[in-house]
Image: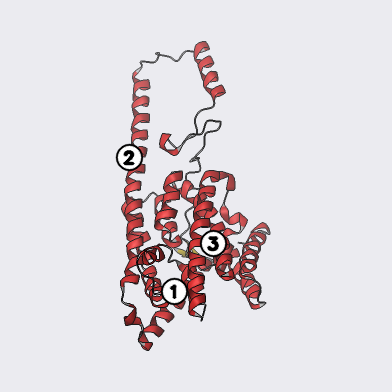
Amino acid sequence: MRIGLSIAVATGLYGVSFGALGVASGLGVWQTVALSALMFTGGSQFAFIGVVAGGGAGSAAFGAATLLGVRNAVYGMQMNRMLRPHGWRRLLAAQVTIDESAATAAGQLDPDEQRRGFWTAGLGVFALWNLFTLAGALLGDALGDPRRWGLDGAAVAVPRPAVAAPAHANRWRWPWSARWPPCWPCRGCRPAADPARRAGRGAVGLVQPRAGGRGTGAGRRSGRLRRRRRAAAGARLMALWGWLLLASAAAYAIKLAGYLVPARWLENEHMSRVAGTLTIGLLASLTAMNTFSAGAALALDARLGALLAAGVALWLRAPFLLVVVVGALAAALLRLAGIG
């Protein structure tokens, strides 16, 4: 249970990064929060916002997120064999089947410890990941590049794939107005104009009237262009809602499919060994992806130092939460020194 709580805290903190990147990619605050709560599988979430940030269509985001979520079916089969959930517990277990909960359960030998580890990590990550996603989405650009804080170094220490969206994309998207009252996402994503600036524009208009008056052809064309742009942005946001909900439903269906495989099929010693090996292999490959991937390219940067530092802390038998903190701190210090 202690390991599960440590994993929940470490992974939940990384949700700040997803929240900030989700808003920067072009999603609204509530779209970003809904993606975390409904899809709830980190790699697929990062894939979705990565495609959106690059200007891709919602269908492309759906495809990328769904492909990365296929691994959860393997986790579901393994967890079904270990936990044997029934009824509503099976439905809930499918939702919280992620890299962290599967890794926590697979790392235990006692069946009771496997069960406690799975539920502690799964429910703990769900609560904290969504809480910190909301915090990151609301803070937005105030966080800057999340890598500066070593959050990707923490991700190296916790098995989690991350298809990172460009931190600089669409930085004008800010969920709050420059002044009170708040400008909620449903009212548009650009900050409302400052009252003093509006008054200043009015004063300038009184002293220096625009040539041709308000009814000129250029003014009318400019107004129509602005209205078209606003309508296109609103239509894209509504379309993204549809693809977001569809991708979340597909992610849950994939998780649940693993639990629908009869547990007796995995009771065979050979099948059990294969399923266990697949789980370990997937977690190892996700750690490698966290460390060496930069979009579609390979990269050697501060994340490698974070992985080595976390490995040393793990070798010294440090508590898991301390291992994650060491990884994040190593990445932040290396970047502060200009490395990576």
Under mark 3, the amino acid is Thr
Q: Position of residue 219 (x, y in %)?
A: 38, 21
Q: Nearer the viewer, residue 97 or 156?
A: 97
Is there a contact, CB below 8 Å, between mark 3 and mark 1? no
Task: Judge from the rendering whether residue 332 lies leftward or rightward of residue 37; answer left or right.
Answer: right
Q: How many neighbours does mark 3 have within 10 angstroms: few (below 14), some (14-19), or many (20 or more)?
A: many
Q: Which residue is mark 1?
A: 282
Residue ID for mark 3: 11
Instruction: Determine the CA span between mark 2 and mark 3.
Output: 34 Å
- Secondary structure state at the residue bearing disc 2: helix
SS class, disc 3: helix
Q: Which residue is mark 2?
A: 235
The three-letter code of the residue at mark 2 reads Ala
Calculate the distance from the C-alpha at mark 3 to the C-alpha at mark 1.
Answer: 18 Å
In the rendered image, which quarter contains the N terminus?
Answer: bottom right
Please say if 132 is above or below 326: above
Residue closest to the far bottom: 269
- Please report whichever mark, 1 or 2, sits nearer to the chain's N-terminal start: 2
Whichever of callouts 2 and 3 sits on the residue coming sooner in the sequence is 3
Amino acid at the residue labelled 1: Leu
Q: Nearer the viewer, mark 3 or mark 1?
A: 3
Instruction: Name the spot of residue 314 as percent of width and height, x first.
Output: 63, 75
Residue 10: image quadrant is bottom right
In this rendering, the count of numbered labels is 3
Q: Is residue 167 visible?
A: no
**Residue 155 placement: quadrant:** bottom right
Q: Give the quarter of the image for residue 194.
A: top right
Secondary structure at numbered mark 1? helix
